[in-house]
């Protein structure tokens, strides 16, 4: 006789958990019994939420002989359209009790109204608890992060701006009985959520809080910080700096846990999220005197760990996913550079090079080797403002650099990192090395306004002589974002000739929008070479001459100023071209 599978329904027959539950969170129970078939698929059940918004999160925990069982879930909208089956993965952050098995959240569409659960490999009855949550009331747009008040005298790396608990909709305090405990942080642990993450990211943070509190039974969210794909940093566990979280396989003392929203076992972390992580880690390394590239004994686990490590280094888990874990060998030195390079941290106060005598060293090279810098927090040196800037009143909040000329021609490039209208509108000036009374040699205030690239071409320099470069923002108010990259170039790429050995030749269209044609004279060198160089002197395209007119594909290159170089037996010449 075929065994009959008894399933306790999710509707009125189900007995919900007796604790008080908000309208956007429901806990239900279900029992699975083995059948003669390999898999059992439940009847279709209504999702028992009063309202839904953004998504429906489902978490499940089992009690019984569920070790070898595969559980899958699928959902349908109210019109009956079913989605694909999703296999539930074990949640290694949860630390379930003996005999329990807990699974990571799955995110169903906001318009999901029904679900089915499938169990494969049952050998004995399994009791399951299902937890449904939908972030009703979360706005469609995340709030703007707020920068904390930093003690810049204590640490050159400020704490990044973040969305606090009130901002993402978390409770004002922790649950009853959860008194914050504090620790001396020695290790920084990187995690991933192992789930879907889409805007608004506050909704995902709320779902993780619900999972940790109402499913795991913790008093608060386990992570200290969470980082969204767009780089937004969210405050996690309440209590402030150095509060002990719940994220490192029970060995949470001496750690700070940072969770990337998303699943990076298959996906790649975004550049914005990685940049925010490095800034956050640089701040904490500075705050707690942690060497970013160092290794030491973690007292709680008894393991020798990198100071910046992944969850898998201290537990049996894939967290933070293969693709994010593979970034850690790069994240460590990048964080170290932010921590030790005085121009690496945003908002350094004051910059180490805000006086002529304290000018930072630049090395002239044939390719641009950018140095990160900032005018944020700079003071005024008192050196008169050069007339080239068009702004000569007030004071210039300037920073200074020095280099030694190795040729008569050089080029200085200043690339603001903050976009308009908040980016630097740089004035770049060259002086001699006499900081007691620096003498102006050349100056430029390039058109284009805030955030625009500025290039100062230098001629008639004396090889072996040292010079000073001064950078400041147009006007007497500092830029909202004064970060920039600067480099000094020399060599062939700075010798821009407009006529010469190969006769007349020109480029059209200029400005270009995806391609240019180089037209040579009637007599041209058939064995010549055409190269396109970016403003840093780096070749980005190369093509041999075969005819009088040669078309060069510029598609895929970023907009900006480029050089087209013509190399022949008679020498080399260059033409400027602007790509839009």
Image (tube, helix red, strand yellow):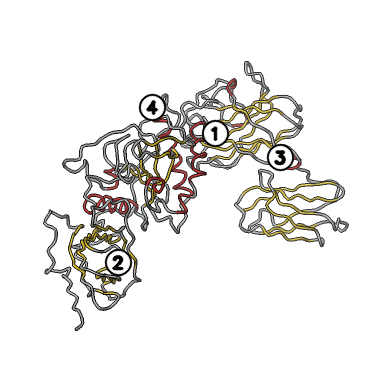
Q: Please state the total of marks drawn on the protein image.
A: 4
Q: Gap between marks 2 and 1, in whole Å?
A: 56 Å
Mark 2 or 4 closer to N-term?
Answer: 2
Mark 3 or 2 closer to N-term?
Answer: 2
* Residue 545 falls in image quadrant: bottom right
Q: Which mark is residue 279?
A: none
* Residue 556 falls in image quadrant: bottom right
Residue located 26% across and 56% down the image: 135
Residue beneath disc 4: 151
Which x, y percent locates residue 392? 56, 26
Please identify, in this view, whether the residue under mark 3 or under mark 2 is nearer the observer: 2
Q: Gap between marks 3 and 4, in whole Å?
A: 40 Å
Q: Gap between marks 3 and 2, in whole Å?
A: 62 Å
Residue beneath disc 2: 69
Secondary element at image label 1: strand
Residue beneath disc 1: 373
Which x, y percent locates residue 382? 55, 20
Secondary element at image label 2: loop
Residue beneath disc 3: 366
Q: Gap between marks 1 and 4, in whole Å?
A: 20 Å
Q: Residue furthest bottom?
A: 1
């Amino acid at each position: 006789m075929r065994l009959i599978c008894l399933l306790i329904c999710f509707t009125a027959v189900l007995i919900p958990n007796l604790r008080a539950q908000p309208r956007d969170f429901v806990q239900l129970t279900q029992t699975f019994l083995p059948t003669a078939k390999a898999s059992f698929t439940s009847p279709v059940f209504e999702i028992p939420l009063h309202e839904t918004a953004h998504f429906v999160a489902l978490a499940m925990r089992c009690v019984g002989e569920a070790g070898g069982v595969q559980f899958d879930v699928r959902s349908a909208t109210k019109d009956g359209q079913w989605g694909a089956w999703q296999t539930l993965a074990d949640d290694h952050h949860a630390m379930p009790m003996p005999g329990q098995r807990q699974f990571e959240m799955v995110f169903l569409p906001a318009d999901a109204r029904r679900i089915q659960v499938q169990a494969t490999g049952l050998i004995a009855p399994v009791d399951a608890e299902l937890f449904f949550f939908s972030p009703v009331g979360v706005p469609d747009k995340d709030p703007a992060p707020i920068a904390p008040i930093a003690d810049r005298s204590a640490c050159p790396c400020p704490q990044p701006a973040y969305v606090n608990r009130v901002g993402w909709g978390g409770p004002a305090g922790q649950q009853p009985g959860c008194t914050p405990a504090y620790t001396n942080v020695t290790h920084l642990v990187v995690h991933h959520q192992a789930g879907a993450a889409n805007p608004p990211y506050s909704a995902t943070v709320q779902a993780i809080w619900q999972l940790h509190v109402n499913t795991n039974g913790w008093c608060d969210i386990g992570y200290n910080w969470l980082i969204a794909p767009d780089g937004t940093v969210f405050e996690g566990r309440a209590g402030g700096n150095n509060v002990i979280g719940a994220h490192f396989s029970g060995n949470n003392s001496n750690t700070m846990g940072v969770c990337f929203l998303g699943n990076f076992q298959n996906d790649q972390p975004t550049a914005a999220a990685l940049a925010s992580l490095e800034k956050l880690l640089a701040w904490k390394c500075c705050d707690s005197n942690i060497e970013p590239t160092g290794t030491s004994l973690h007292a709680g686990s008894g393991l020798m760990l990198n100071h910046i490590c992944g969850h898998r280094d201290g537990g049996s888990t894939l967290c933070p996913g293969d693709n994010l874990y593979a970034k850690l060998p790069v994240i460590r030195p990048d964080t170290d550079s932010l921590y030790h390079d005085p121009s690496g941290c945003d908002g350094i106060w004051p910059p180490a090079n805000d006086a002529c005598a304290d000018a930072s060293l630049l090395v002239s090279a044939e390719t641009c080797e950018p140095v990160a810098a900032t005018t944020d927090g700079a003071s005024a040196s008192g050196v008169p403002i050069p007339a080239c800037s068009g702004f000569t009143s007030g004071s210039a909040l300037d920073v200074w650099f020095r280099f030694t000329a190795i040729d008569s021609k050089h080029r200085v490039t200043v690339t603001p990192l903050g976009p308009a209208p908040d980016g630097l509108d740089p004035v770049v000036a060259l002086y001699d090395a006499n900081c007691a009374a620096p003498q102006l040699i050349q100056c430029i205030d390039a058109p284009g306004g805030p955030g625009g690239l500025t290039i100062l071409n230098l001629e008639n320099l004396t090889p072996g002589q040292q010079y000073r470069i001064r950078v400041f923002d147009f006007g007497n108010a500092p830029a909202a974002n004064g970060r920039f990259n600067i480099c000094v170039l020399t060599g062939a790429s700075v010798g821009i000739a407009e006529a010469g050995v190969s006769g007349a030749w020109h480029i059209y269209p200029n400005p270009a929008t995806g391609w240019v044609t180089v037209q040579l004279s009637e007599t041209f060198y058939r064995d010549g070479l055409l190269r396109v160089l970016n403003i840093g002197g780096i070749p980005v395209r190369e093509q041999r001459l075969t005819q009088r007119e040669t078309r060069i594909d510029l598609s895929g290159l970023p907009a900006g100023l480029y050089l087209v170089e013509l190399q022949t037996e008679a020498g080399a010449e260059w033409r400027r071209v602007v790509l839009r």
